[in-house]
Image: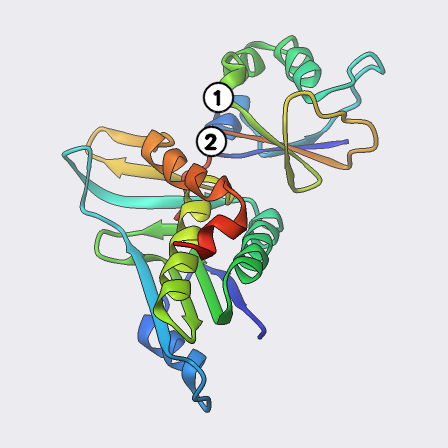
Amino acid sequence: MQPTIRLQREDFDAAAEAALLTRGRTDVGAVVTFAGVCRGAESGEPIAALTLEHYPGMAETEIARHVEEARTRWPLLGVTVIHRYGRIAPGENIVLVITASSHRQAAFAAAEFLMDYLKTRAPFWKQVEGKAGTAWIEAKDDDNAAAARWKKPAGDQAAE
Amino acid sequence: MKLVYFAWVRERVGKAEEEIEPPASVRTVAELIRWLRGRGDEYAHAFEQAQSIRAAIDRSHVKPDAAIAGAREIAFFPPMTGG
C-alpha cells in the first residue's frame, strides 16, 4: 500500500479521492472519509477567512511518520491525507483524511488517530481574518487531550 | 546554522529565516532561546514566553534540552493548530 500524502493550495474532491482507494479491489470493507471544513465563525465571531501557514518539508515528513505509525497499529489497506495551506474561506475544505481497511473499527480508529495528530503535531498554524483584523488561533487543550489518548501502547488499541 | 520562524514567532521577529552563529557556550535549544532574547527587542518579544515556543531541529520536533551541535536548521514556532 502506497499512502497518498499531499500538501496543496488547491481544493480537493473527497469522493474522488475515496473512490481511488477501492478502485479495482475487493478486499476493502470499510472506507472512512473525514473532511475538515472552515467554519464561518470562531469563538462566536464571524470570520472572513482562515490562512494556514505550514513548514514545508517538515509537514510532509511529520504526516508521513504518523501515517506509518497508523499502519503499524491497524491493518490498513489504504490511507490518503491531503492538507491545504494558504487562504481558505468559510465553507471550503481544509483537510482530508481517508482510511480504508477490511473492517470498520480499524478505519474509524486510524482516521481519528491521524486527525488528532494533525491537530497537534503537524507543523501548521491557523490565522483568523475577522472584522478586527487577524489573529493566530491558539492551541486547544481539547485537541491535546484527544492526541494524548493515543499514547498508550498499540496493543491496548486492538482490544477496543 | 539557519533559523526559521513561523506564525507569530515569525511576525514578532520580523523575518522568516536567518543565518546565525551563536557562541560555543550556547549548547541547547533553551540556551539558544535565551541567547536570541538578547539580540533585540523584537527577539525579546518573540521569545518572552519560552513555554509557548516549540522547536524543531532539522525538521524533527525537539525538547528545550535538545543539543544544537551539528544542527543545520532550527525552527521556532507556536504550538501547532493544523487539521
Answer yes or no: are tags 1 and 2 on the same subunit: yes
| Crowd tier of the residue under label 2, counting other residues whose Cα lies within 10 Å: few below 14, some 14–19, many 20 or above | many
Give the answer, above or below, for where B29 lies relative to A26. Answer: above
Q: Helix, strand, or loop for circle 1?
A: helix
User: Which of the 4 image quadrants contains residue A34?
Assistant: bottom left
> Is any part of residue B2 visible from this angle?
yes
Report the residue at 45% width, 48% height from top: A118
Q: Which badge, 1 or 2, is on the more N-terminal residue?
A: 1
At label 2, the amino acid type is Pro
Horizontal side of residue A93 vs A9, given as left or right: left
Horizontal side of residue A97 vs A91, given as left or right: right
Q: Helix, strand, or loop for circle 2?
A: loop
Q: Which mark is residue B52?
A: 1
Quadrant of the drawing holding the N terminus of chain B: top right
> Is any part of residue A85 visible from this angle?
no
Report the residue at 31% width, 60% height from top: A35
Disc 2 designates what residue? B79
Give the answer, above or below, for where B5 lies relative to A79. Answer: above
Q: How far across and down, in percent of the image, does residue A107 sit?
A: 40, 65
Query: Could you tell me if the residues under marks 1 and 2 are in contact, i.e. CB atoms within 8 Å?
Result: yes
Report the residue at 54% width, 69% height from top: A3
Relative depth, front residue between A86 and A60: A60
* Spatial CA span between label 1 and label 2: 7 Å
